[in-house]
């Protein structure tokens, strides 16, 4: 047993309190320390799955690791943590997180008890947001015919860990309700996990750059039932790297994800054998996606706005592969078609990793935008940058 260092430099996290309600069971950890403003971290799970809740503190550890590193606060977990996870957190996990973001501090994480993992359960889950990556995972790990039993999905999960932005809990519920009929049609139970985890993160640690730990924290809370969790990766193998990159930190996913396994809950990064364009082509063979694909980043409502960058990019990627007509019930395809030249010019001038593939396809289709349209898009991009810089 290792003791906490001093009151001023650490936070003590208490053992989970399990609080059954009429339909939901809340798992609550109190956090005692003077630099956190939130007094507790909680996850809320349907009573039906309450026997899957792990009595260990692995989920709380993953949830609070980056917030504690940001505040340079050593963590003392006053309960049981899986020994391999505790070891990896103090070694490679923090080392990798600091490689990606050198402004994070290295902290000391200790626990009252550390024990080997229990035997893993047979259930296999993945997060289902209705996006291209999660449909691709369903295609590979549920709908395909050659899946080994130990990799075949048995459950889908949906989390409130920060991806809903200002839409918060309202959007979390709306999006889940919109996707639930699709999970039903697939014949997979769709588990909803609510939490206040987002309240713990600073603005610097936004959802895209910290989503791996947030999501896996919520899934590992149910490691008494989920023995394997398939994390849908964002990128193809060819763009992975471990270096500071505030905009595309997902490029380190396949390195970070396996370090978070506990033995009782094996986590695996999947989907990198396909590029974004290849995934879209693959997903277009899954009929369940036609009326439920949801890629939108707008926090206003569930479903696709057909106006945000992600919606426009996805429609263009579908258009260039001749599958956009399959998605007329989830996108405003008419609006896309009337703005097509400007949308092509916008992605033609971008420099993100996935934009190179789109640009290659634009060339193959001889759809290169006119110089006038490119100049207009550059002006729009500059104006947006200026607007964001003055608005913060
Ligand atoms: Zn959108």
Image (cartoon, rainbow, N blue to C red):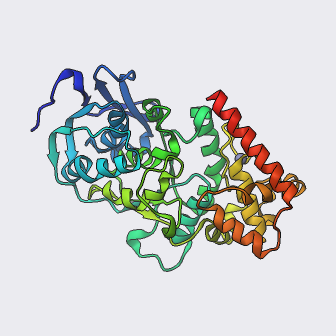
Tell me the quarter of the image containing the N terminus.
top left
Q: Is residue 333 visible?
A: no
> How many badges with numbers are in the image?
0
Q: Is residue 155 left or right of residue 116?
A: right
Pinpoint residue 99: horizontal percent, then vertical percent.
Answer: 36, 50
Nearest the viewer among 128 and 122 is 128
**Is residue 392 depicted above or below 163 in this figure?**
above
Nearest the viewer among 50 and 317 is 317
**Quarter-of-image position of residue 2:** top left
Pinpoint residue 282: horizontal percent, then vertical percent.
Answer: 64, 72
- Residue at point 66% right, 37% down? 299
Tell me the quarter of the image containing the C terminus.
top right
- Residue at point 28% right, 56% down? 264
**Is residue 145 depicted above or below 91 in this figure?**
below
Residue sitting at the far bottom: 146
**Is residue 371 depicted above or below 236 in this figure?**
above
Pinpoint residue 174: horizontal percent, then vertical percent.
Answer: 64, 39
Q: Is residue 235 left or right of residue 49?
A: right
- Residue at point 47% right, 34% down? 198
**Is residue 161 depicted above or below 333 in this figure?**
above
Pinpoint residue 249: horizontal percent, then vertical percent.
Answer: 48, 51
Residue sitting at the far right: 338
Q: Is residue 38 visible?
A: yes
Q: Is residue 35 left or right of residue 387?
A: left
Residue sitting at the far left: 1
């Amino acid at each position: 047993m290792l003791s906490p260092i001093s009151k001023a430099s650490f936070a003590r996290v208490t053992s989970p309190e399990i609080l059954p309600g009429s339909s939901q069971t809340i798992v609550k950890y109190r956090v005692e320390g003077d630099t956190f403003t939130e007094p507790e971290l909680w996850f809320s799970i349907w009573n039906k799955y309450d026997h899957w809740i792990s009595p260990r503190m692995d989920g709380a550890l993953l949830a609070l690791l980056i917030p504690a590193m940001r505040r340079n606060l050593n963590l003392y977990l006053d309960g049981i943590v899986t020994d391999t996870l505790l070891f990896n957190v103090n070694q490679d996990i923090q080392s990798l997180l600091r490689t990606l973001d050198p402004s994070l501090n290295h902290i000391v994480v200790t626990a009252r008890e550390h024990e080997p993992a229990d035997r893993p359960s047979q259930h296999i889950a993945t997060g289902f947001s209705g996006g291209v990556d999660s449909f691709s995972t369903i295609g590979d790990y549920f709908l395909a015919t050659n899946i080994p039993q130990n990799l075949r999905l048995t459950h889908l999960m949906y989390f409130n860990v920060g991806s809903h932005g200002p839409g918060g809990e309202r959007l979390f519920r709306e999006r889940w309700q919109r996707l639930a009929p699709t999970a039903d049609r697939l014949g997979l139970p769709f588990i909803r996990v609510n939490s206040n985890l987002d309240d713990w993160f600073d603005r610097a640690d936004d959802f895209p750059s910290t989503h791996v730990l947030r999501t896996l924290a919520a899934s590992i809370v149910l490691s008494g039932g989920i023995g394997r969790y398939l994390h849908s990766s964002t990128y193809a193998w060819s763009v992975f790297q471990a270096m500071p990159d505030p905009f595309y930190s997902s490029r380190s996913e396949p390195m970070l994800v396996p370090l978070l396994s506990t033995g009782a809950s094996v986590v695996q990064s999947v989907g990198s054998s396909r590029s974004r364009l290849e995934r879209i082509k693959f997903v277009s063979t899954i009929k369940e996606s036609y009326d439920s694909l949801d890629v939108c980043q707008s926090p206003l409502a569930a479903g696709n706005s057909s106006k945000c960058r992600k919606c426009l990019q996805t429609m263009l990627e579908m258009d260039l592969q001749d599958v956009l007509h399959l998605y007329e019930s989830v996108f405003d395809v008419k609006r896309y078609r009337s703005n097509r030249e400007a949308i092509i010019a916008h992605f033609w001038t971008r420099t993100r990793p996935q934009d190179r593939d789109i640009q290659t396809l634009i060339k193959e289709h001889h759809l290169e935008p006119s110089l006038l349209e490119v100049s207009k898009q550059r002006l729009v991009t500059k104006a947006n940058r200026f607007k964001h810089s003055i608005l913060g």
